[in-house]
Amino acid sequence: FCFYSSRENFKPEMLKGKRVIVTGASTGIGEQMAYHLARMGAHVLVTARTEAKLQQVVERCRALGASSARLVSGSMEDMATTRQLVEVAEAELGGLDMLILNHVGKSYFNYFDGDVGHVQKLLNINFLSYVAMTVSALPMLKRSGGSIVVVSSMAGKVGFPFTVPYSATKFALDGFFSSLRQEFSIQSVNVSITLCILGFIDTENAMRAAADVLLMSPAPKEECALEIIKGGTLRQREVYYRYASTKLPLPNDNGTYKLIPLNRL
Ligand SMILES: NC(=O)C1=CN([C@@H]2O[C@H](COP(=O)(O)OP(=O)(O)OC[C@H]3O[C@@H](n4cnc5c(N)ncnc54)[C@H](OP(=O)(O)O)[C@@H]3O)[C@@H](O)[C@H]2O)C=CC1
Ligand SMILES: CC(C)CCC[C@@H](C)[C@H]1CC[C@H]2[C@@H]3C(=O)C=C4C[C@@H](O)CC[C@]4(C)[C@H]3CC[C@]12C
């Protein structure tokens, strides 16, 4: 009851004039979040590596009615990018109301291949940069009584096959942010932390990686993006978006697959 009644309290006007950073906003769910925020009249600051794509996202945000739209391009492997983002928010927006951490580095959807270097690289992109962004943005978020939104996955709540490095980075996010949320509560820090637990979503990259293998229909990225924004705005601890029962195909040696129900793994 509480879950549904609070969600019904959401009004798009709540985002009007709010200053929001969205990471990983050049494609997928992040891009859709930028468009929703623009329609709601927020100040949007988007980031990712591909500047040309970000430029298009910014133009569309302006057309959709954003109070303002800006970009910072750069890799989240580089601490200079996190610093620059926070500087732009401070200097040009005068602060920050919501930090949406959504980007992920490329990984594979298959058996763990033993590449430790890849795990380290993915931890830097998917986890450490989230920590760095949070630390640098925290003074601004404390001032505004703002929100941190962390996009995670069902693979960050349960051990799921074929996502070993990725899953590790998402579990790390849960540990860091759920613990930090407790400290904020003890210290009366008025900054909310919303962890988003997503199932399979129909973004281009996820479809390319997993659509042939996963026997379930993905949920739409537009609706997913909106549910994340609602949950963050209402300061929910966690957002769960679209569960479905599914069977996992396990590869045979001859290139065919056998179907294993998840409850038998
Ligand atoms: N789609 C799905 O099925 C699911 C997705 N999720 C989560 O949702 C979130 C969004 O996923 P989705 O929209 O599918 O992802 P996409 O692959 O579509 O987008 C990833 C974004 O991250 C950016 N990015 C990648 N590498 C870097 C880097 N090194 N530095 C900075 N930015 C980078 C990409 O832009 P660029 O390449 O330009 O840098 C892009 O904007 C992720 O946190 C993901 O884990 C969770 C469960 C399921
Ligand atoms: C427990 C069951 C009822 C539901 C199972 C849901 C499963 C199928 C969902 C939960 C999390 C999902 C993965 C995810 O988080 C992100 C990515 C990255 C992307 O680039 C490629 C696809 C991939 C691996 C998703 C694949 C599908 C996963 C495993």
Image (cartoon, rainbow, N blue to C red):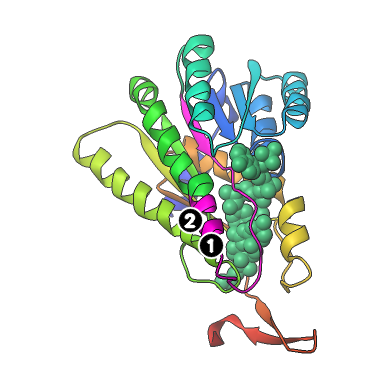
Question: Which residue type carries mark 1?
Answer: Pro
Q: Look at the picture and state if 22 lies above or below 219.
A: above
Which percent across, then down, holds residue 250?
A: 68, 83
Instruction: From the viewer's perspective, tell me whether residue 227 is left or right of residue 148.
Output: right
Which percent across, then down, holds residue 203?
A: 73, 51
Question: Which residue type carries mark 2?
Answer: Thr
Mark number displayed over residue 169: 2
Mark number displayed over residue 165: 1
Q: Which residues fall within the magenta stretch?
A: 97-123
For label 2, the SS is helix
Question: Is 247 in the magenta?
Answer: no
Which percent across, then down, holds residue 81?
A: 54, 28
In contact (CB < 8 Å): disc 1 and disc 2: yes
Report the front residue among 223 and 175.
175
Q: Picture quarter containing residue 45? A: top right
Report the front residue among 250 and 40.
250
Instruction: From the viewer's perspective, tell me whether residue 186 is left or right of residue 190.
Output: left
Instruction: From the viewer's perspective, tell me whether residue 49 is left or right of residue 153.
Output: right
Decide: few, some or many residues near mark 2? Use Cα within 10 Å; few <14, some 14-19, many ≥20: many
Q: Would residue 87 be seen by someone viewing this image from the given angle?
A: yes
Residue at x 45% of width, y 16% of height: 95
Quadrant of the image where one finds ligand 2 = bottom right
Question: Is 107 in the magenta?
Answer: yes
For label 1, the SS is helix
Which percent across, then down, holds residue 91?
A: 49, 10
For marks 1 and 2, give the CA distance.
Answer: 7 Å
The image shows a total of numbered marks equal to: 2
